[in-house]
Image: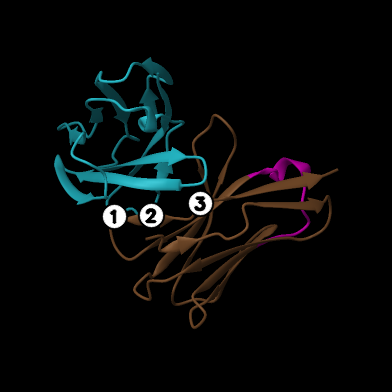
Amino acid sequence: DQQVKQNSPSLSVQEGRISILNCDYTNSMFDYFLWYKKYPAEGPTFLISISSIKDKNEDGRFTVFLNKSAKHLSLHIVPSQPGDSAVYFCAASSGNQFYFGTGTSLTVIP
Amino acid sequence: KAGVTQTPRYLIKTRGQQVTLSCSPISGHRSVSWYQQTPGQGLQFLFEYFSETQRNKGNFPGRFSGRQFSNSRSEMNVSTLELGDSALYLCASSPGTPNYGYTFGSGTRLTVV
């Protein structure tokens, strides 16, 4: 049973616009959430994280929002750049194990 | 500082064979986790080792096994390979709990024919 879900397999946005990637989870015990970016033939690289005591975390162009009541996580990229084109995975943890979503492939069109 | 190193990068095996994949974590990292990535399935957790002990295990059959050595290097073994085992196998290391400094290697692409 998938405890972390990314319901949009793909997303296309114009360069300079906002990209919003969504993630839903089912386990209310999750207390730490991360986003990873993955290019083909490379391992995922850490992008940004948020703990359950916060509802927002910003790092440059990347902002993660957490809505605990809705069990929903989102990643905003503003402005989007062609180099952001990659697969984005969200992950959640309640201890020593991460649960990953199936990924959203983002394409930023120049 | 060197990252997480996985060897080999690519591997082709035939059904029924067995395979061993290797992962060298970042120096000082004691936790190593293994994942299987297939299209549409995301990253599926295999197991996690910490100080040579398996601390967590995912829902994979017993054909998938692993171990960790005293220098924190880890190996993953898959016996009696099936076509469905074709995937990218990723390992990730962290200092202790996977919450902090969780870093992935580039993966081993296994193709079973």
Residue at left 40%, top 49%? Answer: B101
Name the subunit of mark 2: B
Name the subunit of mark 3: A
Residue B29 in the magenta stretch? The answer is: no
> Is residue B2 visible to us here?
no
- Judging by colour alone, the chain drawn in cyan in this rendered image is B
Q: Dot 2: within a 10 Å radius of its alpha carbon, few (fewer than 14), some, or many (20 or more) residues?
A: few
Residue position marked by numbered label 2 in the rendering: B100
* SS at mark 3 in the image: loop
Question: Answer yes or no: do the residues labelled 3 and 2 have beta carbons within 8 Å?
Answer: no
Boundaries of the magenta span? A76-86
Indicate which disc residue A102 carries: 3
Depth check: give the residue in front, A2 or A108.
A2
Chain A: drawing colour: brown
Q: What is the count of numbered marks? A: 3
Residue A82 in the magenta stretch? The answer is: yes
Residue B2, by quadrant, is top left
Indicate which disc residue B97 carries: 1
Quadrant in which the N terminus of chain B appears: top left
Identity, as a three-letter code, of the amino acid under mark 2: Tyr
Name the subunit of mark 1: B
Indicate which disc residue A4 carries: none
Q: Dot 3: within a 10 Å radius of its alpha carbon, few (fewer than 14), some, or many (20 or more) residues?
A: many
User: Cα distance, mark 1 to mark 2?
Assistant: 7 Å
Quadrant in which the C terminus of chain B appears: top left
Identity, as a three-letter code, of the amino acid under mark 1: Thr
Question: Answer yes or no: do the residues labelled 1 and 3 have beta carbons within 8 Å?
Answer: no
Residue at left 60%, top 66%? Answer: A74
Q: Nearer the viewer, mark 1 or mark 3?
A: 3
